[in-house]
Amino acid sequence: QVRLVESGGGLAQTGGSLRLSCAASGRSLSNYITAWFRQAPGKEREFVAVISTSGPIIRYADSVKGRFAIARDNAKNTVYLQMNSLQPEDAAVYYCAAKIYGAVSYDNWGQGTQVTVSA
């Protein structure tokens, strides 16, 4: 198992930016497909972005395309989520998740970091 710890959440104004970090320990995150999910109050958890083990394959939810960017730094065992042009609807708890290639589901999750966007 790989241990994941998110950081970088906080309060941003509408149109502002935040960068979330997902730091891994215990195993090399370079061996894991890593994704960001988010969950707003009263809503189901939703997919935000995913990056492959080596980084060339990246996918985004339609709601964040063109505004968010996922990247990985394997030397730092960390995956990032750069969030620009934040909107009130982006407010949520953001979770980092990882899985081995071929796994059915994500079985490694962080504790989450809160993102609040003021109007």
Image (tube, helix red, strand yellow):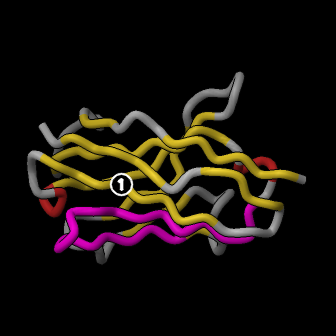
Measuring from the top left, give residue 106's x and y in whole percent: 29, 37
Side of 29 where 80 appears, left or right = right
Side of 3 where 115 appears, left or right = right
- Asked if the stretch drawn in magenta spans residue 83, the answer is yes
Q: Nearer the viewer, residue 57 or 93?
A: 93
Q: Nearer the viewer, residue 106 or 83?
A: 83
Measuring from the top left, give residue 115's x and y in whole percent: 64, 47
Which residue corresponds to the image point at 48% horizontal and 63% vertical from the top-left? 81
Q: Which residues are the magenta region?
A: 69-86
Q: What amino acid is at disc 1?
A: Cys
Note whether 98 is above or below 65 in the view shown.
above
Note whether 70 is above or below 36 in the view shown.
below
Where, by quadrant of the figure, is residue 108 drawn? Answer: top left
Which residue corresponds to the image point at 59% horizontal and 41% vertical from the top-left? 114
Which residue corresponds to the image point at 49% horizontal and 59% vertical from the top-left? 20
Quarter the N terminus occupies: top left
Note whether 68 is above or below 95 in the view shown.
below
